Image (spheres, rainbow, N blue to C red):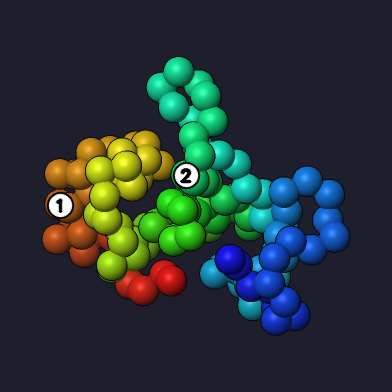
Amino acid sequence: MLIGNSGHTGLNQNPGNCLYVPNICNNGGTLMKVENMRSANGNKVANQFVIYDDNGAEYFQSYDSIIAIKDCDQNIQLDEHYWDYSRTTGKYRNQFLGENKKETQAKIDSGGYILTNLN
């Protein structure tokens, strides 16, 4: 679960699916919107989420783990432990990044993507 600047976990009292959490692009907190990812048929997929903040960053979350972040400058960070955790995670990571695993691996190897601990 994401934690806000106040130290409390979970949803605040904002309408919709918004969370107040520290933002990776500034020193304050921000509102975040959570959406289920969609299958090829357009159906919502359980346990696969894209989280948007109001500073332009996007997060891919699979189950309880943050897998990837596109920050407000479109830099990509991948979780060093979970970026390639399972076939399902990989499928939706590829959808989030708009590329296949081979392309992702090449960007990791070249330093274009940063592997770090996101969880």
Q: Residue at x 16, y 60 (%)?
A: 110
Pointer 2 residue: 48
Kindly identify the residue that appears in the image at 54 percent across and 69 percent down.
Answer: 24
Q: Measured along the vertical axis of the image, is residue 116 above or below residue 111? A: below
* Chain-order first, disc 1 or disc 2: 2
Split into 4 quadrants, where in the image is the C terminus? bottom left
- Identify the element where label 2 is drawn: strand
**For the view shown, which residue lies furthest in the top direction?**
41
Query: Going by the picture, which residue comes out furthest to the bottom?
Result: 7
Side of 47 relative to 91 (left or right): right
For the residue marked with disc 2, what is the amino acid? Gln
Residue picked out by circle 1: 106
Left/right of residue 35 with respect to residue 82 in the rendered view = right
Looking at the rendered structure, the kind of residue marked 1 is Ala
Q: Quadrant of residue 78?
A: bottom left
Q: Nearer the viewer, residue 27 or 47?
A: 47
